[in-house]
Image: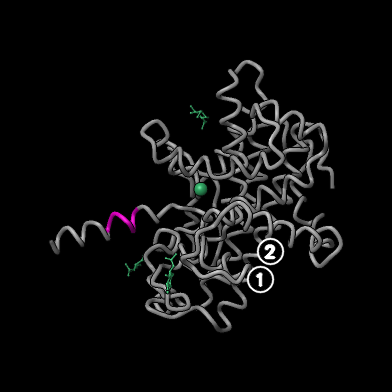
């Protein structure tokens, strides 16, 4: 019985391992991004996805996490992150591409691959729709700082509590901290209504508020030149990964990671700073996703 219990616990931990942003994070990035698509981008994507749903990007934002759990999708598990083998944090947060990317691939190469595949007319509809779903998901994941960090499997081995909820650092950044943006507990069950609420709350901060001045900087690598070659796309995606990795040192693992072990991270200064980083990450992910899709489909970012 004890063995069974231990086994069940280990299985749960493993399941949580690569979960990426939880439902709230992924859907919010996609739904916010959708508001900034150019009309032609929307038409093209809806055709590729065979849908006219008004929330079509939110609807497919989680697909890649379901797919990797199926035998057919197992190959894609390692494509949701890149293991930045740095200092480790907080000493240094420097990403090396392609050095940090194993031969089986990582999120940087995957963004380039699936961006190309979604536009390839020689591929069948199923493959192109899959490519769109991967791009939407991976531009969300790359905005989660711990998806660019090798230490302790992206913080999965750092056991913490968050407002009393037993979890690990990676899962807290995927789920617990995003939930605080809606004042929801870590164990809340998220529906697409929550995600839509959060996306609609963030939109004005982007359009007229505090994030407006930084949009140009976030889109620095969104150039016509970048999307012309695989190498160019990889360079852009590597820059986004580096950006996320710097956030690890700046706001995620700001003390020696051994000192985070066993700590309660909710309710104080850590949570306050983490909320700022998560909110900025969601908005940044949405801007980069919309700008990227517009650039690839129409030839300009739309911002
Ligand atoms: C691109 O994606 C396809 C479909 O998933 C895969 O078969 C192929 O190996 C990938 N290519 C690269 C270079 O990652
Ligand atoms: C977590 O992983 C790091 C290496 O990535 C290792 O140095 C550390 O000892 C691990 N901690 C635990 C508690 O397993
Ligand atoms: C969430 O956790 C709280 C206490 O930590 C508990 O009272 C509540 O029933 C839990 N809710 C769900 C949906 O599991
Ligand atoms: Zn993911």
Mark 2, residue position: 280
Residue 288 position, x and y percent, is 71, 49
Circle 2 Cα neighbour tier, 10 Å, few/some/many (<14 / 14–19 / ≥20):
some
Q: Which residues are magenta?
A: 10-14
- Does 198 appear in magenta? no
Residue 234 position, x and y percent, is 62, 40
User: Does residue 51 appear in this view?
Assistant: yes
Q: Is residue 136 left or right of residue 204?
A: left
Q: Nearer the viewer, residue 17 or 46?
A: 46
> What residue is drawn where x is 57% and y is 77%?
271
Q: From the image, give the main secondary structure of the stretch colored magenta.
A: helix
The picture quadrant where one finds residue 249 is: bottom right
Circle 1 Cα neighbour tier, 10 Å, few/some/many (<14 / 14–19 / ≥20):
few
Mark 1, residue position: 276
Asked if the residue at tag 2 contacts the one at tag 1, i.e. Cβ–Cβ closer than 8 Å, the answer is yes
Q: Is residue 258 left or right of residue 231?
A: left
Residue 160 position, x and y percent, is 41, 74
Above-or-below relation of 301 to 210 = above
């Amino acid at each position: 019985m004890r063995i069974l219990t231990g086994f069940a616990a280990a299985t749960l931990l493993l399941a949580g391992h690569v979960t990426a942003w939880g439902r709230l994070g992924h859907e919010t990035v996609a739904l916010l991004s959708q508001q900034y698509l150019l009309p032609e981008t929307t038409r093209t994507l809806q055709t590729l996805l065979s849908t006219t749903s008004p929330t079509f990007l939110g609807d497919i934002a989680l697909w890649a996490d379901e797919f990797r759990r199926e035998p057919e999708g197992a190959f894609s598990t390692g494509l949701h992150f890149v293991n930045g083998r740095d200092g480790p944090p907080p000493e240094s947060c420097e990403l090396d591409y392609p050095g940090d990317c194993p031969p089986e691939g990582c999120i940087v190469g995957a963004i380039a691959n699936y961006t190309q595949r979604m536009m390839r007319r020689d591929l069948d509809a199923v493959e192109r729709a899959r490519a769109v779903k991967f791009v939407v998901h991976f531009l969300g994941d790359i905005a989660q700082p711990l998806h660019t960090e090798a230490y302790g499997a992206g913080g999965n081995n750092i056991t913490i509590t968050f407002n009393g909820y037993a979890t690990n650092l990676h899962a807290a950044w995927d789920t617990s901290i995003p939930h605080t943006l809606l004042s929801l507990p870590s164990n809340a069950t998220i529906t697409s209504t929550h995600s839509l609420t959060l996306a609609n709350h963030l939109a004005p901060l982007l359009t007229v508020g505090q994030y407006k001045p930084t949009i140009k900087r976030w889109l620095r690598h969104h150039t016509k030149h970048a999307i012309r070659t695989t190498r160019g796309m990889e360079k852009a995606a590597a820059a986004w990964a580096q950006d996320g990795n710097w956030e690890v040192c700046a706001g995620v693992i700001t003390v020696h990671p051994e000192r985070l072990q066993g700590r309660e991270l909710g309710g104080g200064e850590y949570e306050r700073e983490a909320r700022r980083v998560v909110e900025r990450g969601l908005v940044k992910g949405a801007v980069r996703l919309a700008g990227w899709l517009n650039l690839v489909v129409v030839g300009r970012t739309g911002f």
